[in-house]
Image (cartoon, rainbow, N blue to C red):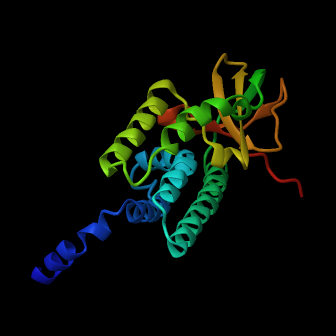
Amino acid sequence: MNAIGSFLIDNIHFLVNVNMMILIFGIFMIVSIYLKNVSKIFTEIVWIYSSLIPAITIVFLNYKPNLILVTIFLILQLLFLFLYLRSIQNNYKKLVESTKNPISKIKEIHNEDMGKEKSLEYVGLFILPFITVNESVSTLVIIVIIAVVIVIIKRFGLFYLNLPILLFGRLQYIETNRRMKMIVLTSRNFIFEKNEEYDIRSFVKSLNLYIYLPRKKK
């Protein structure tokens, strides 16, 4: 124990380094993709982290990391996105195969691409607050900024502001024949059709987000 304590004291400057903390947190987020069965909160945490990737990237680069750290960071983010997108697809497929869900008939399509129309909001919330974050800004300030952004996302339901995921998908705002309005994550090249029926599932319940992935044509 003494040896561990001495190591931590001697290397505390390294352990609390912002870039190292970001890398460690990135690894934790990759692990969190597979922790949804432990607690549903991980589904929400991972979704919000994915939306923060551009902001986290700006913060990371502003702290002037060396080439090795940049390479590790990029690998972690790409691995996270790959595993997360694959898990989204697999989870939806398992739900459809293992459970029955009332088919939703589309009455109205209010917005077939919410992410596209909300791009300026994304820049204002996820980019601008982080541009001036650098070595002169304390770690606590960064944590506070991120916490404020997350609170805004939760309070005002801005979960559709998720550029990394929407590079591969699309968010559509629809209304069913049961007068239920939904924001649904779909594949990028898919658009709902009025009066057609779809197997729409709940994706992130706490964020009131739904998902529908069409079957691939053989």
On the image, the x and y values in percent for residue 208 come to 54, 31
Q: Residue furthest front?
A: 136
Q: Is residue 183 left or right of residue 190?
A: left
Q: Pick out the residue farthest to the top.
A: 179
Q: Determine whether 95 is above or below 81 in the image.
A: above
User: Looking at the picture, how far across and down is residue 195, in whole percent?
Assistant: 83, 24
Q: Nearer the viewer, residue 12 or 34?
A: 12
Q: Extreme right residue here?
A: 218
Residue at 47% x, 34% y is 206
Residue 197 in sight from this viewpoint: yes
Which quarter of the image is occupied by the C terminus?
bottom right
For the question of whether residue 160 can be seen, the reply is no
Give the quarter of the figure containing the N terminus: bottom left
Residue 83, given in percent of the width and then of the height, sits at: 60, 62
Q: Nearest the camera: 160 or 38? A: 160
Q: Quadrant of residue 119?
A: top right
